[in-house]
Structures are given as structure tokens and as C-alpha cells.
């Protein structure tokens, strides 16, 4: 009887742990991205890009505001949609592609790929089609972005993108 009682007690206290859903890879990536809150700066060829990352909506949304010049800004908004992590990029071109998290690679880079978007009708325009973002152990933030022409086919095997390296300037 003692054995049955002990077993019942053990099972009772194990139920909450068994019922908790494991964190999805997308949720884990989102939690890691939240650690980037603060201000970041990249300087390339004498041009400065500032990025401010903030959390809003009770921590359910992460906002990156990019300032390339006093008159040119863009924004990327990250939010969970069930078990998917979505990133909507609001581009100075006036389009808004949505990208979905696909993986975190062995180097810790979080990869996003085009899902759909708004205002992509202009065949002469382009849009962000893929990006990855990585916070390195040395504290640097690296982001690689790929833009393609609206309506063009994406060739992942030959994608090199454009990379910027940012340093944190304030938490």
C-alpha cells in the first residue's frame, strides 16, 4: 500500500511538468531576439545605420526601427502566431513583406523566409525576401538581408545577401 501511495504522490506532482508544452524552436528564437532590446549602430563606407529594438504589447511583440538617414526609416515587427514566428518588414519602398522563421542554424543565426506581403504589385520594385540575424558571443549583432525583384524566383542556393554588423550603443 505504501508503494501505491508513493507512486500516486509522484504522479500527482509530475502532471504539471508533463502537461507543459515544450518550447517550439520559433518561440526559443523569439525569446533570444528579445535579449537584443536596446540601440545598435553599424557604420559602413562612412554611412551610419541605427537600429532601436523595443518590446511592446506586454512583451508579445518586438519592434526594430531602422534609421538610415534623418528622412529614411524602416521597421521590422516580430510576433508569434501560434507556433510560428513572423516578421513583417515595413520598407521605405512602401511594401510590407511578411517572413516566417525557418530555423536557427549551428552558428545561432535565426533565418526568416518570405511568406507573403502587401504592395508587391510593382514589377519594377523589390522586396526583402530572406534575412538572418545573429547575436554573437562577442556582443556584435549581424544581420544579412536578401532583396529580390517583385515576382522574381528566389534562388536560395546562390543567395549571398547583404550583411551589416552592429555594435550595441545602449541597453
Image (spheres, grey):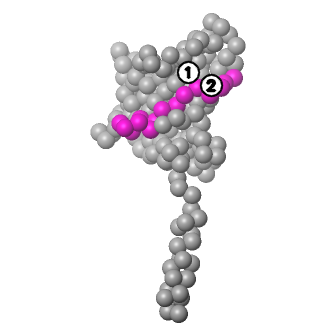
Q: Label 2 near label 1: C-beta < 8 Å?
A: yes
Helix, strand or loop for disc 2: strand
Locate residue 138, reporting x and y percent: 29, 39
- Which quadrant of the view contains residue 127? top right
Q: Note whether 78 is above or below 2 in the view shown.
A: above
Is residue 113 a member of the stretch shown in magenta? Answer: yes
Q: Looking at the image, can residue 19 be seen?
A: yes
Helix, strand or loop for disc 1: strand
Locate residue 111, reporting x and y percent: 48, 32
Q: Which residue is drawn at 59% across and 12% down?
A: 152
**The one of 84 and 55 positioned closer to us in this rendering:** 84
Q: Note whether 47 is above or below 13 in the view shown.
A: above
Q: Distance between the Cα atoms at labels 1 and 2?
A: 7 Å
Q: Give the farthest residue toward the top.
A: 124
Left or right: 101 in relation to 41: right
Locate residue 60, reporting x and y percent: 60, 47
Range shown magenta: 104-118
Left or right: 142 in relation to 8: left
Locate residue 101, reporting x and y percent: 54, 36
Q: Looking at the image, can residue 67 be seen?
A: no
Q: Residue at x 60, y 41 (%)?
A: 84
Q: Which residue is drawn at 52% across and 35% down?
A: 102
Any mark on residue 128, and which? 1
**The one of 71 and 104 positioned closer to us in this rendering:** 104
Amino acid at each position: 500500500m505504501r508503494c501505491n501511495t508513493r507512486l500516486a504522490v509522484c504522479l500527482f506532482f509530475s502532471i504539471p511538468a508533463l502537461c507543459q508544452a515544450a518550447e517550439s524552436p520559433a518561440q526559443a528564437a523569439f525569446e533570444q531576439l528579445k535579449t537584443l532590446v536596446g540601440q545598435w549602430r553599424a557604420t559602413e563606407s562612412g554611412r551610419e545605420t541605427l537600429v532601436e529594438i523595443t518590446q511592446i504589447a506586454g512583451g508579445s511583440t518586438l519592434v526594430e526601427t531602422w534609421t538610415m538617414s534623418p528622412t529614411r526609416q524602416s521597421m521590422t515587427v516580430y510576433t508569434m502566431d501560434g507556433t510560428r514566428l513572423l516578421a513583417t518588414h515595413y520598407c521605405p519602398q512602401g511594401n510590407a513583406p511578411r517572413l516566417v522563421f525557418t530555423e536557427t542554424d549551428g552558428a545561432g543565426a535565426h533565418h526568416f523566409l518570405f511568406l507573403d506581403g502587401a504592395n508587391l504589385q510593382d514589377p519594377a520594385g523589390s522586396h526583402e525576401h530572406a534575412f538572418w540575424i545573429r547575436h554573437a558571443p562577442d556582443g556584435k549583432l549581424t544581420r544579412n538581408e536578401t532583396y529580390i525583384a517583385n515576382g522574381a524566383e528566389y534562388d536560395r542556393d546562390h543567395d549571398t545577401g547583404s550583411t551589416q554588423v552592429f555594435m550595441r550603443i545602449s541597453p
